[in-house]
Every structure is written in structure tokens, then in C-alpha cells.
Amino acid sequence: MWYSTLGPLEVLRDGHAIDLGPRQRRVLLTRLLVEDGRPVSLTELCRSLWHEEQPAAAVASVRAHISRLRAALEPDRRGSASVLISSAFGYSLKAPCQTRDTVVFERSLDRAREALGLRDLALARQEIDTALGLWRGDALGEAAEYSFALREASRLKAAHQEARELQTTILLQQGEVEHAVRVAEHLTVTAPLREVSWALLVRALYGAGRPVEALRQYERFRGMLAQELGLDPSPVLRKLHTAVLRHDTAALGLPRSSRYANPSAAPSATAPPPRAPLVGRKEEVAGLLDMLKAAAGGRVHWAVVCGDPGTGKTRLLEEATALADRAGFAVVRAGGGPGPYGDRTTALHCLSTSASGAARAPGADDGTRDGSEKVLGDDPVTALVREVTRTPTLCVVDDLDRADPHVPERLSRVAAVLRNAPVVFVCAVRDPAAPTVGAMLAEVARLNTAWLQLKPFTVADVEELLADRGERDSAADAEDLHRRSRGNPFALGELLKLPREQRSGPKARVPATVGAVVRAQLNEVAPPVRTLLSHAAVDGGVVDIAVLASIGQTEHARLLESVDEAVTAQLLLWQEDPDIPASGRYLLPELVRDVLLDSMSVPSRQLLHAALARELAGREGTDPERLAGHLRAAGPLARSVEAGRSHPSRRTASS
């Protein structure tokens, strides 16, 4: 047996989920699991389920639920119960520690801490991945809102946050700074006033070669802390801020493999050799190389890299910095992203690295102790123009549309005054139509700007990537991975980190990072949209407007509004019919469908399967296989559907 409460309650026997019955019964089982084997009196169980508004039949109802749970947990039992037992003190659940995901999680977390203390990074990474892999959603699932679960749910949530923080620390020590940045960014969202998480984000951003962004995020947290609590950052975080300003990597606790680990060797502004080959971007790379060659003749060139999240914009910018380094260009970086800009964190405070590799801060040759102070004292545009025209320079601006509005405004001014200099500007944006960047992009469009629109990978690109990994006999794998990732480089990269048998097929898993991104997308859409997507996920990932409108008792027009919002959020795709022009169907991407299904309890899925089967059974022309599939998945509810089919008059009367 396996008891899982790190997400919707689930009990597995031999790898198969047990039907635990209705919500109240599942909450009752959670109540017993929370007690860790200690007995709970009948009175307390009633109070836990109904608070002070207990029905007259509360005791009988609890005893009935206990009986049903015993039958589900020990279906072959003969004699006294050995799992859900009763005594003079009440009822208790005897579940060995190794069969409960909460215990396994905390033990793996402890082992990860111990391994990190012993500098065994490989073991620490293995244990923390095991611990975090047990989480499928919010702790205690649907029972988390009950008063008895508040303390335990809060404790587990805090433990999960600590585990993610430990994961970030391990990633930093292993040199996986970009992964560490992504995890740390998520941590600051889930606990916006937790200083430890922000400190990790500052360290990770600096280690990733993004000191400007590290300073900006410090200022963002400082502002939030002052506004919400009237406090200043702790001395520890203030020292971390000073370490970033002084490029003190020892104080930052970064390994020598980080991009800023050895400032005298200046690996900072030029990206290190990538861990994975850059595939599917040959034309874009060739275009950037041509621009660098042309700019060397003394003419400013601009390029705008556009693409959806995860299409590899930042990866292409890293390739551009490597090309610039080989061509003898200096590199100046500026970052976008959310957050306020204080006087000391203006976006044009950029680190510059000379072609020879000697790191220098702007103004360092003027004898200032910290060059950033001189730049920040000047007009930002004047400072940037002076800096980038000292030597052939590549200026890279990532996430421009997420930056403070001052950043594109200042770049517009740069574009207006700087024409004849050996400089290349490359800006990455998610949405070129965003109002914050519209004027700036219109300004640079008049300068013969190169527009690089990053498309999803093709199947051939995936095959090339697999071949580079030594997986050459994998044409079928390439097709599966391309379909599952939709050609998104980020999703594909995360899938490739999984064991081969878990990337697709019956044992397929959703990578934790991808799942976090999808859940964040789902949280941003309206509840009716999430309901629509959940229903479609249970129906094989296809949006059948007529069927879903019927089971959801929703007007077609309102349902189509939800479809439109889901398509805009990239949670639904339109698949055209190649044989019939202007026709097709809406589909859920595989990873989105899997995340939705994983977030639902088994009974919830069975209820939806039964509702879909009931609706399909009453429609002419229903695909028999589709109906049969829903009946199988409806579990014990299939009988009621079959009974309704056998007696249509009953169904008509009841409706």
C-alpha cells in the first residue's frame, strides 16, 4: 500500500489507485493519516467533518464511512481489521512509515541536507529530486481547508519551500545556475516575503552572469519589505547586496564554475560553452554573425529576437555573446523582468567585458573604486553610449517587454542618436505588440532592423538533438517528443532529463519544472476556463463543444468565450482538418492534459467519465470506442450509466 497526501489524496495498491469513495470519506481518511497512527475519538471525527453543525446522523455516517474504508483498504479481510482499527480511544490508521509519502519526503529531505553538509553533491541532488518528485499538488488536497488540517498543511508547505530552497543551493553548487534561477524565481512567488528565497535568487542571478538583475531583485524585495512590514532587509541580505556590488564571489558562496566565480579571469559577459548543442537556429545564428561582421565596419545594427516563453531566446543571446567574443567584441548586458528600479539599479548599469577577457566595470578606468557608481551618476543614455562606443561592442537586452518602461524609452533615445559606431544591439521580447515596447520597436524598425522570430523545433530538429546525445536510432522517439513538447525547446530539454521510458508512452511523466509552469498558466485563467480544460482532459484532450456545454450546463457562446481565453493563454491548440478547409478541432497539449489529470482525484475523474458517458449514450452517432472508454474509466459509476441506458424512460423522467 502507498498513501499519498502531497497532492490530492491517493491510496495505491500494487500501483493501482483504490476507489476511496466520496469527498467526505476521503477527508475522513486524511484526518486519520494526519494523526500518524494515533487514535481519534468518534466525537472528534464528527467535529472534524462538520465542525459545530453536525447532522443528527453524524455518528452513523462516520461509522458507515469507516466500514466502507475498511472494505476498500482490506478487500480480502477475514476477521478483525488490521489497517483501520478501533479501540476504546477511537479509530486509528496503521500505515507503516515507508508507505506514506510525507514520511518518505521528509526523510529524503534530511538525507539531502546531510549529503550537502558532507559535500556529496551527487547524493544530495538525488535525494532532493526524490523528495520533490513526491509532490503532485497542494498538501492534503481537498482536506487542506478543514480546521484539523491547517497546521499540518502549513507545516508541509513550509517544508516544501525549504526543500526547493535546498534544491536551489545544490543546483548553484553544481554549477546549474540557469536552473537555479528558475527555481528561485518560483520560490519568491510562492513566498514573496521570505528573505531566504530572495537571497538565493540574488545569488543565482549573479552566478548566471546577470548582476544587474540581481541588484534589481534585491531592490524589489527591499521595497516590498518596507511597504508591507515597514522593515529593512536583514544584515545578512545587505551583506549579500554589497557582495554583488563588489563582485565578491567568495562572499556570495558561488563555485568557481559560475560565470562570475573568478572576476580576474573575466568569464562573465561571454557565455560558457553550452551544455547542449544549439539546434534549429542555423539561420538566426548566421544572421547574427553577418551583423557582427558588418558592424565591425562602423555601422550600428539592431536585431529583435521574438518568441513565446521557452523558445530559446535567452539561449540564442548566449550564442550571440559567444560569437561576439570570438569576433573581438566587448559585451554589455542589460536585463528586463519585473521589478522597480531604484537609483542604484537602473537597467543601464551593465557589466562590460573586453575582448581580451579582462573584466571591467564602467568607469573603472577613471579611478573610481566601484565603476557602477560613476555610471549611475550620469544620464543613463549618455553613459551607455559612451560605454558601447569605446570598442566594438555587442549590447544584449533580454526580456525587454518585461522591463521597466524606462528601459525601452532609453533604448529609443540611443537608437535616435547612435548610428555610426561598431555596435550591435540584440533585444529579446516575448510580445513585440506589448505597449511598453511599441514605440521603441517602431524607432528601430526604421534602421533596417533584423527580426528573428523563433519558431518551435521541427521533428528534424528533435532528431538532430537526439543524435547529438548519442540516441541515433530514435526516429519514433523524436516524433513522440516533438508531439509531447510541441517543439518547445524548454519543455523538450526538461523531458530529455527524464529516463527514456518516462518521456512518452504509458509511463510518461511531466517534468516538475514544466508542471510548475503549466500550473501557473492555469492559475491565471478564469475558473470557467479551468473547468472547461478539466472536462476536455478527461475526454481525451479534445474539446467537444456540444458535449461539454451539455454536461457543464453552459451556453455555447459562453463556452466559446472560455475556449478563446484558453487559446490566448496557449492552453488550447487549434488543429486544422487537412481534408476540409476552415474546419478542425481544439486540442489540449499533452503536457497540459497530463497536468490537469494529475491534479484531479480518482473519484473526480470517475464522476466526469460517468457524466460524459451518460451524455454520449444519449447521442446518435456516438463513437462506440469513445463511449466504452468512458464507461471503463467511470469505475463503479458505470453501472448507473448502464442502468440509465437500459431504462431510457427513467432518464427522461429524472431529467
Image (cartoon, helix red, strand yellow):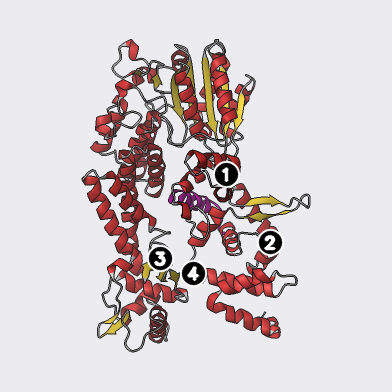
> Which mark identifies residue 487?
1
> Which mark identifies residue 602?
4
Q: Amino acid at mark 3?
A: Glu
Q: Earlier in the sequence, mark 4 or mark 3?
A: 3
Cα separation between marks 2 and 1: 27 Å
Cα separation between marks 2 and 3: 33 Å
> Which mark identifies residue 145?
3
Crowding at mark 4 (Cα within 10 Å: few <14, some 14-19, many 20+): many
Crowding at mark 1 (Cα within 10 Å: few <14, some 14-19, many 20+): many
Q: Earlier in the sequence, mark 2 or mark 1?
A: 1
Q: Earlier in the sequence, mark 1 or mark 3?
A: 3
Please provide the residue range marked out in magenta. 511-527
Up/down of 646 relative to 627, above or below? below
Cα separation between marks 1 and 3: 39 Å
Crowding at mark 3 (Cα within 10 Å: few <14, some 14-19, many 20+): few
Q: Earlier in the sequence, mark 2 or mark 4?
A: 2
Residue at 63 percent across and 50 percent down: it is: 567
Q: Amino acid at mark 4?
A: Val
Foreground pick, 99 / 431: 99
Up/down of 322 relative to 149, above or below? above
Residue topped by disc 2: 545
Q: Amino acid at mark 1?
A: Gly
| Residue 364 screen position, x and y as percent | 33, 15
Residue 523 in magenta stretch: yes
